[in-house]
Image (cartoon, rainbow, N blue to C red):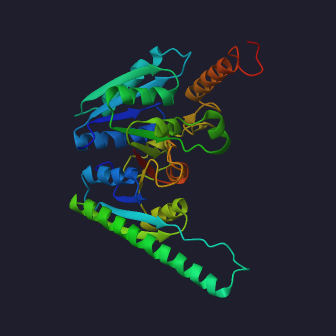
Amino acid sequence: MRPTEILFPTDFSTASERAGRVARAMALESGARLHVLSVVPPVTDPARFAEQVARTGRDLGEGLRVETALETGLAGRRIVDYARAKGIDLIVLGTHGRTGFSHAILGSVAETVVRLAPCPVLTVPAAMPERRDASPSSAAAPARPCLVCGNASDELICEPCRTRIRAEAAGQKREAERPGRRGMPA
Amino acid sequence: MASGYHRIVLGLDGSPHSRRAVAFVARLAPPRGGRVTCVRVVEPVRLPSMPLVPAAMRAQIAGEAAAIERHRRSVAQHQVDEAAAALAGAGWRARGVLRTGLPLSELLAAIRAERADLLVVGARGAGAVTHLLLGSVAEGALKRAPVAVLVVK
């Protein structure tokens, strides 16, 4: 039995673009349905991502059965929930290859997914060497890499990362200040 | 696998998860020139230092350790041969390799040696702590492998 439902969770970064191509290739080959899922951090307006996830689905979906979905919450958990609900049998996931400090503060979606997923997970690293058949479109000089995800950005930390960090901080603050937690009045 | 992965290193440890990993790769359509190296790492038997033990007994203990290691290697060899045969049956060019040392570092070394572009491992393996969701080898591979990693459950 080959995979019939392949899930590609994306955050629209360069790292996940690569994983998207791999997911598409595997879906084409096995005749599987491709699920494109984007998880919007809590306290963020999901509307602006709806169009983006639809576009990603169209871009990857030529000649494929595609299903796109938008969820709100913590990415790792939501991806795993989706995989369970939809009977996914392979998750293809991009990794930023963050280590050390930025890894420790941001945690890792990939790690959560690999741990909890009900099915095999293929992680595709951002720095994976690819065959040089793409046109050198990067000649359009990206400003500089974002400190967190390494995507080109005009600012030190790019907009999607800022949003994510803010949302995660808010979530953690909420959790930390929940009544009854150690050091807090019940 | 049309996804561009041609050289696969498949880490085996004889666990149910690693058997499923073999089955998963076997189901994928092999690309032209696609090859899989099944790697089984055998950890050497480490003896404590025995300064107070009489020489004869030391020799006997060392002999038994060697016998244990021979046994482990023959079991491991059987496992990689079996896996390689299953993959060859599915159309992959497959071979089995035994390495001696620490599992994670030997797997990473195998990736370099084979110039692999994909590492496949079972989610958790033969270690004592089987209740973990992710074994130490799989976790280490995710963190340190320079290539794509497929974790099979």
Can you tell which quarter of the image residue A106 is in?
top right
Q: Residue at x 43, y 36 (%)?
A: A117
Above or below residue B127? Residue A81 is above
Quarter of the picture holding the C terminus of chain B: top left
Query: In the image, residue A10 lies at what x, y percent?
Result: 44, 32
Query: In the image, residue A156 lies at what x, y percent?
Result: 65, 33
Q: Residue at x 34, y 50 (%)?
A: B20
Residue nearest the observer in this picture, B6 or A52:
B6
Can you tell which quarter of the image residue B33 is in?
bottom left
- Is residue A14 visible from the viewing direction of this image? no
Above or below residue B107? Residue B52 is below
Q: Residue at x 49, y 43 (%)?
A: A139
In the image, taking residue B102 as reference, residue B26 lies left or right, namely left
In the image, taking residue B16 as reference, residue B93 lies left or right, namely left
Residue nearest the observer in this picture, A54 or B139:
B139
Query: In the image, residue B55 lies at what x, y percent?
Result: 66, 87
Query: In the image, residue B102 lies at what x, y percent?
Result: 55, 64
Can you tell which quarter of the image residue A183 is in?
top right
